[in-house]
Amino acid sequence: MRPRSSAYSLAECRRLLPSATATARIGADLTAVVTGTPSARPASLLDSVAARETSGTASVWRFSAGSIRRALDAGRTRDDITADLAAVAAESLPQPLTYLITDTARGHGRVRVSPAACVIHGDEPSLLAELAAHRGLATLGLRQLAPTVLISRSPLETTLAALRAEGYAPVAETAETAETAEGTVRIEKTRPQRAAAPVPAPRGTGVRGSGRIAAPGVAKAPAPVDPNVLATRLLKAPTTPPAPGPLDGGAHAIDAGEPSTVEYVAASGSRTVRTLSRHMLDPPYLEAWCHLRDDERVFTLSRIHGVMSLTPE
């Protein structure tokens, strides 16, 4: 006789295992209970619209506004959620759950967030509408939010280049751009970097009559200075003080770190009176905190016409 096989058939295995539960008991306390092993359909549905709390001989899920919102964010609708839950519920859905689904769905999507890399705005609605409908700017992904506001899905540099390539003349607003008191846009210019003047190599000195030329790059040693001659020159020098500069009246304020008031003439010719503090003198510029603009500013010394310290000397 052949020995009896110890392996079970698939039908025998299914008979030994308990059958999966395809229904859930949904209570008014916003919980769903599935006794035994839940089947794939109710388990997947409840995991998508509720938070699982326990698993074992009985699995428990709890509904909340956050779990319903998560299902709505995944693309489900209020009617879909209600219909699917009603299909797996052992009884009709309790009223608190239907209210929760309805209230959460009512507020879902009232605020929308769109991707944007930069903002385009202006004072002419017709010009902004022209930009939004321009076929040559379609690659920017422009979208009109208001008559004078567009958003672009392309970076600022790409958007500027595309607008200029189509014949427009936009200007960029960056972190260095500020609004003046008159409401016009003012772009702060960066300080020009001045390269140091190259030092010329010393010329070779020839020794007349000897036919020899000194090696290039070797500087001639300075002649010794007689101290008596130098002292005589200093005593004969004029004692007239130099003409006062525009910052002499408030130089002590800069040295002591005290606030001062200056009269400044802009490049446009307009005159303003500024209160400055936290000075940093770096000729031909003066860096200071401008109380009028409430920001760091750089002033050209030649445009400062008068300085007055705010504290008595």
Image (cartoon, helix red, strand yellow):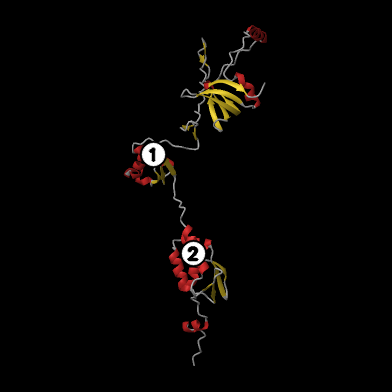
**Marker count (numbered):** 2
**Residue at the far left in the pictured view:** 135
Q: Amino acid at mark 2?
A: Ile
- State the residue position of label 2: 101
Task: Inspect this view and state whether residue 222 appears.
Answer: yes
- Is residue 31 rendered to the left or right of residue 126? right
Specify the amino acid type for callout 1.
Ala
Q: Is residue 168 left or right of residue 106?
A: left
Front residue of 85 and 250: 85
Mark 2 lies on a secondary structure that is: helix
Viewer-closest of 121 and 2: 121
Q: Is residue 259 left or right of residue 209?
A: right
Q: Identify whether 139 is placed above or below 230.
A: below
- Is residue 40 in view from this perspective? no
Q: Quadrant of residue 51?
A: bottom right
Choose mark 1 or mark 2, whichever is in front.
2
The dot on residue 161 is 1
